[in-house]
Image: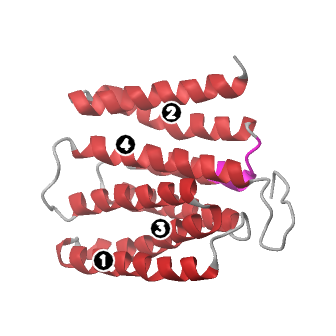
Amino acid sequence: MTRSRLLLAAFAVATAADLVSLAVGFPPGHLVAKPLLMPLLAAWAAVSGAPRLLVAALLCGWGGDTLLLFDADPAFLAGMASFAAGHVCYLALFHGRGHGLPRARADLLAPCYTTALITTVVLLWPDLPADLRVPVACYSTLLTAMAYTAATRLGLVAGLGGALFLLSDTLIATGVADWPQLPRPDFWIMLTYVAAQFLLTRGALDARLAPTAHGEVPATTP
């Protein structure tokens, strides 16, 4: 097997181990598997010719994953900041890449994402801890911008990844707000999160040789 296939297989095995551990309630398995996910995905992306910004976004995700393993508000805020840095990397990467949706379709998506953002923040706001309200609102705005840009610049695969990232982080926020949760909430959070990161990576890799907004073919590294 090539290095690329080995790394992708290792990522799949780590993902399965993490999700099974969460599904059966085996915390040690989650503690071991979760920190492996984004480094393996980043390594696969790197050997597949990923731009450096994509690798950086995934490693920021690894930082956030690791920090969120600690059950403390400072670690939660630091993890949110690490994920926010990853979204900035995604935004910088997506800007100007791919063909993009026709203007009319992109304009149609904008109010959908805006409505989802405003509705989510307004509903969660009263139930969030006071010191997390503004950080969560700012982070949600950045995340929504990333998801919208993924959908409008890179297309269906990356757009679905952005939407799943929104869903995953919304599930986290509802837990912080102490809303009723699905059984095994961490399982659903990780399922949607890992799928989101993989689809964003796949979409970015597919678009790395696509013409830019100016009709040029971008280099494989920014």
Q: Quadrant of the C terminus?
A: bottom right
Task: Give the label, 4 or 3, closer to the camera.
Answer: 4
Q: Is residue 52 left or right of residue 31?
A: right
Q: Which residue is mark 2?
A: 36
Q: How much space separates mark 3 and mark 1, taking CA atoms?
A: 12 Å
Viewer-side residue, 78 vs 58: 58
Tell me the crowding category of disc 2: few under 14, some 14 to 19, or many 20 or more residues within 10 angstroms, Cα based: some
Q: Amino acid at mark 2?
A: Leu
Range shown magenta: 49-56
Task: Give the label, 2 or 1, closer to the camera.
Answer: 1
Circles 4 and 3: CB atoms closer than 8 Å: no
Q: How much space separates mark 4 and mark 2, taking CA atoms?
A: 15 Å
Tell me the crowding category of disc 1: few under 14, some 14 to 19, or many 20 or more residues within 10 angstroms, Cα based: many
Q: Name the quadrant containing residue 213.
A: bottom right
Does dot 4 land on a helix, a strand or a loop?
helix
Tell me the crowding category of disc 3: few under 14, some 14 to 19, or many 20 or more residues within 10 angstroms, Cα based: many
Residue 70 seen in render? no
172 up-or-down from 123: above or below: above
Q: How much space separates mark 4 and mark 1, taking CA atoms?
A: 23 Å
Q: Which residue is mark 3?
A: 143
